[in-house]
Image: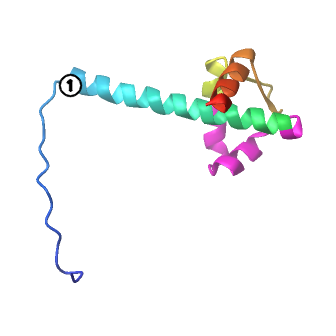
């Protein structure tokens, strides 16, 4: 098939949903993504602490393939959730809850 020819697509059927139902669905997906992010971060932080004695944001960014501001934002979320502790310009450490989550992720 040449570049000029188009593929025939299956018709996309839209379903009208109430705004509240649609918002609830999007919120559920966002919570699932936040949970995945938290698990990735605490597991990596635990690994870095085990290997190097500390987890620095620059290493987290490098290993996750993201920019430093993304790490900073997500570490703030993890801190608010009680999973990490950090002093300004210092390494990141897991709280007891963070260690438990990291260990559960490793077992899986």
Compared to residue 80, the image places residue 75 above or below, namely below
Question: Looking at this view, is 22 or 99 the one in front?
Answer: 99
- Magenta-highlighted residues: 51-74
User: In which quadrant of the rendered view does residue 51 lie?
Assistant: top right
Question: Looking at this view, is 102 or 70 the one in front?
Answer: 102
Q: Position of residue 71 (x, y in %)?
A: 65, 39
User: Left or right: 48 with respect to 20?
Assistant: right
Q: Position of residue 45 (x, y in %)?
A: 74, 34
How many marks are shown on the rendered structure? 1
Residue 54 included in the magenta stretch of the image: yes
User: Which residue is depicted at the point 62% across and 36% down?
Assistant: 40
Compared to residue 51, the image places residue 102 above or below, namely above
- Bin the neighbour count of mark 1 within 10 Å (Cα to Cα): few under 14, some 14-19, many 20 and up: few
Q: Which residue is mark 1?
A: 19
Question: Looking at this view, is 46 or 27 the one in front?
Answer: 46
Q: How is the image coloured?
A: rainbow
Q: Can the viewer see residue 55 in this picture?
A: no
User: Which residue is depicted at the point 76% across and 32% down?
Assistant: 46
Compared to residue 22, the image places residue 7 above or below, namely below
User: Which residue is depicted at the point 13% across and 41% down?
Assistant: 14
Q: Can the viewer see residue 1 in this picture?
A: yes
Quadrant for the N terminus, please. Answer: bottom left
Residue sitting farthest toward the right: 53
Q: Main secondary structure of the magenta part?
A: helix
Residue 39 included in the magenta stretch of the image: no
User: In which quadrant of the rendered view does residue 20 lie?
Assistant: top left
User: Which residue is depicted at the point 63% across and 25% down?
Assistant: 78
Quadrant for the C terminus, please. Answer: top right
**SS label for mark 1:** helix
Q: Position of residue 69 (x, y in %)?
A: 64, 42
């Amino acid at each position: 098939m040449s570049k000029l020819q188009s593929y025939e697509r299956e018709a996309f059927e839209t379903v009208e949903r109430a705004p509240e139902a649609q918002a609830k669905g999007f919120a559920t997906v966002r919570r699932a993504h936040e949970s995945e992010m938290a698990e990735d971060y605490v597991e990596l932080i635990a690994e870095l602490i085990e290997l190097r004695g500390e987890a620095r944001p620059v290493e987290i960014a490098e290993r996750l393939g993201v920019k430093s501001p993304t790490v900073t934002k997500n570490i703030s979320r993890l801190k608010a959730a009680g999973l990490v502790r950090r002093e300004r310009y210092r390494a990141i450490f897991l709280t007891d809850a963070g260690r438990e989550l990291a260990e559960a992720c490793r077992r899986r």
